[in-house]
Image (spheres, rainbow, N blue to C red):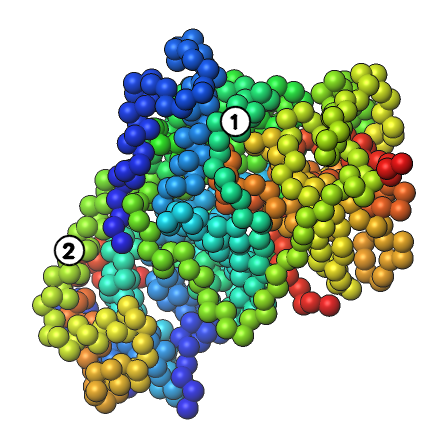
Amino acid sequence: MQLGKRYPWFFWGLLLLAGEGAWAQSGSTVGPIQGDHTAEAVRWLERIGLAGERSHYVGTVVMQQGDEVRVSRIAHAFDQGVLKERVQTLDGAAHEFVRVDNEVRCLWPQERMVVVEWRPLERFPKLSEADARALLEHYAFSLGTMQRIAGQSCQLIRLTPKDHLRFGHQLCVTHPDGLVLSAQILNEQGQIIEQMAFAEIQVVETLDAAHLNPSWATDGWRVLRTEHEPIDVRGQGWVFAVPEGFKRVREVSRKIFVAGDVARWKQTMQSVYSDGLATLSVFIEPADLKLDDGDRAVPANAPVGARGATHAWSRRVGQAQVTVVGEVPAATVLQVGHSVQFEPAK
Amino acid sequence: MKLVIETKAEHGRAQDDPSCAQRLCCLADGELAADEAQIALHQLLGDRQARVWWDEIHWVGDALRSSETAAQHHADFHRRLLDRIEREHAVPQPQGLGKRGWQWLMHHLFVPGVAVGAAAAVLAVMVMPQWRLDAIGPSVDRTLEAQGPVREPAQAGAVVLVKDNSMHPYLQAHRELVPTHGVLPASAPYLRTSAVVQPKREP
Amino acid sequence: MAKVDVDSALVERVKRGDREAFGLLVSKYQRRIFRLLSRFIRDPAEVEDVAQEAFIKAYRALPGFRGESAFYTWLYRIAINAAKNWLSAKRLVPLPVNAEGDADEDWALAMNTAQNETPESLLASRQVGEAIGRAVAQLPEELATAIQLREIDGLSYEEIAQVMQCPVGTVRSRLFRAREAIAAHMRPLIDAPKDRRW
């Protein structure tokens, strides 16, 4: 494996574009860069999305949520159109996540268990111009000063929410490639509530499979694969409101595994939304009317749970239990949760 | 078996007694049975030159594996550390490692609790027109009436740090299905501690 | 007869109050711990401080260590926690959204711009790399093979004996001679004069 700090060849094209200010995309609104900041912002976002997908690197990441800090080792590659990643935790109980495109295997060596998480394969997975423009309708884009992260010079980028329903983001990306080396989430008071940053990173042209393969042989391990299939939540009679700009990504009927003294599977409906930065999931399932020993009852007026930028809230709606989870402010999950209603079609 | 200790460094190496020095190699490699290991340990602990050799064995091993690691040789570190242990009479006591999580809650990167009143105020402000009902199929999106009342008061306004596992199944499901082709790295959901769900035995 | 794991044996002695035994564990692992911490902490003096904290914590916690993992794994986690605590302590005042200049740089530093290659460390590791390369190049082939099978491939003596088609006693002797030769070659680089080492 060649180690080096040269940028992969396909970024040179973008470098030229950035330097000359030429319009690469047809169909975009026409205008000089200086006078149309949206176009520049769109190009930044597209570049960031592309770099995030197409780069090859290994590095060590520190993630901080509130007072919790976690250190992980990451390897990432884009191999003939297939996204591959391995995330190894360096503290706590040893475990790792190995991604191949839409499937992530979670390896738990002490339990000798693999949990396979997966999403339906997306036809157009890349961040598109339309996605970038949609994002910019709800976040203001601005460039900050140059920073140094993991020994590399980076451009600070701010995405400031235009409303109170979402958090602000600050990214530091390599220039001109746009690889995210650090990301911070800020609350309305401008405080950092969650952040991740590379402590070290090596961007390379190719990555050896040894960096991306599972760390353990899993012969004889138990393999659990999550189950979910598409469902129409509105067709079941449920409606709810989400903040402007959040688009529905998918809706599934699925099992979740509820741990506890008596562990069991629960069937639930999950609706996933995203505004390009933040994501939300709304879960609706029959409420536990009879609780087994050891199960934690979710009271009707539970407080909003928080961990870093993630907030979660659950409430009873008639016979159903509704849970809202997302990297949005507490008030937002509250509002979404409150808006859930059962309105069967006439 | 006694090791002769000389005051002059160049003559006092543990290697001068090859059998001892070789035995120490085996000890370091985990290749001694209990009886020989006891002898080797005894020599190692009782003899300064043996400890020097022990240090060199491991330095060589580190150097063969990684010159960066081997370069991290801070000569006085060991002595200063042991001095400190002596000074503090740090008699080993049973003491759990313990997470000092809450003690490190120092600079308010933790989301401040939202008081009930504040939550209500925020909700009042946020009542549309930013909200719209997400409708499926051919029907047009409905927007909520501008002055629509909030159906329930925000009594659940307190925000608490989630340290238990009740939300984990939802966090895992959320992490699994969110899009990865965005601005943030695809790995981000898997870096969040909140989303790490350690499996238990299946029911 | 069962082979003795030296870390476990040393840990047992530390539990019985033998501080020298702890010193042996320190000298075995200190470089790896320094290397680990230097990924997150730039200043070598601070790396040493945090390393000292980590080892002190380990010493105090040893009575509670029951060998549920390897000693080094346990020590490694203590070191990571020490690094995390250091990072937390280094966090600065919350950053207003529109701050520019110094504040931005401060948080970036706090978020560990671990440039683990300072000019000094680069030079030091290159020197070590060159010296070890020369030392190994000068070894007779059977010694070089034996030491690499042991230190890099992690084979047991039995396994090395099979690979090299020789008796275990010969493996023992070869490893000893290889280490002796390399140590002699590298001694100028291993800083302090021996009589000051302890």
The subunit letter for the residue under badge 2 reads C
Is B100 left, or right, of A36 in this rendering? right
Taking depth in this image into account, of C125 and B194 the one nearest to the observer is B194
Residue A279 is drawn in which quadrant? Answer: top right
Mark 2 — residue? C130
Q: Secondary structure at mark 1?
A: helix
Mark 1 — residue? A130
Q: Secondary structure at mark 2?
A: helix
* Residue appearing at x 50%, y 73% in the figure: A219
| Mark 2 Cα-neighbour bin, 10 Å: few <14, some 14–19, many ≥20 | few
Q: Compared with residue A326, is residue B129 higher up or lower down, i.e. above or below?
A: above
Mark nearer the viewer, 2 or 1 = 1
Q: Position of residue B82 (x, y in %)?
A: 40, 58
Taking depth in this image into account, of A273 and C63 the one nearest to the observer is A273
Is B148 left, or right, of A97 in this rendering? right
Is B107 left, or right, of A24 in this rendering? right
Residue C193 is drawn in which quadrant? Answer: bottom left
Which amino acid, mark 1? Ala
Q: Compared with residue A235, is residue C62 higher up or lower down, i.e. above or below?
A: below
Q: Is residue A87 visible?
A: no
Which amino acid, mark 2? Glu
Q: Position of residue A170 (x, y in %)?
A: 50, 28
Q: Position of residue C75 (x, y in %)?
A: 46, 60
Give the distance between the C-alpha atoms of the residues marked 2 and 1, in whole angstroms.
Answer: 54 Å
* Residue appearing at x 51%, y 36% in the figure: B182
* Residue appearing at x 31%, y 49% in the figure: A206
Q: Is residue A319 visible?
A: yes
- Give yes or no for contact between labels 2 and 1 (Cβ–Cβ under 8 Å): no
Image quadrant where one finds the C terminus of chain C: bottom left
Taking depth in this image into account, of C125 and B169 the one nearest to the observer is B169
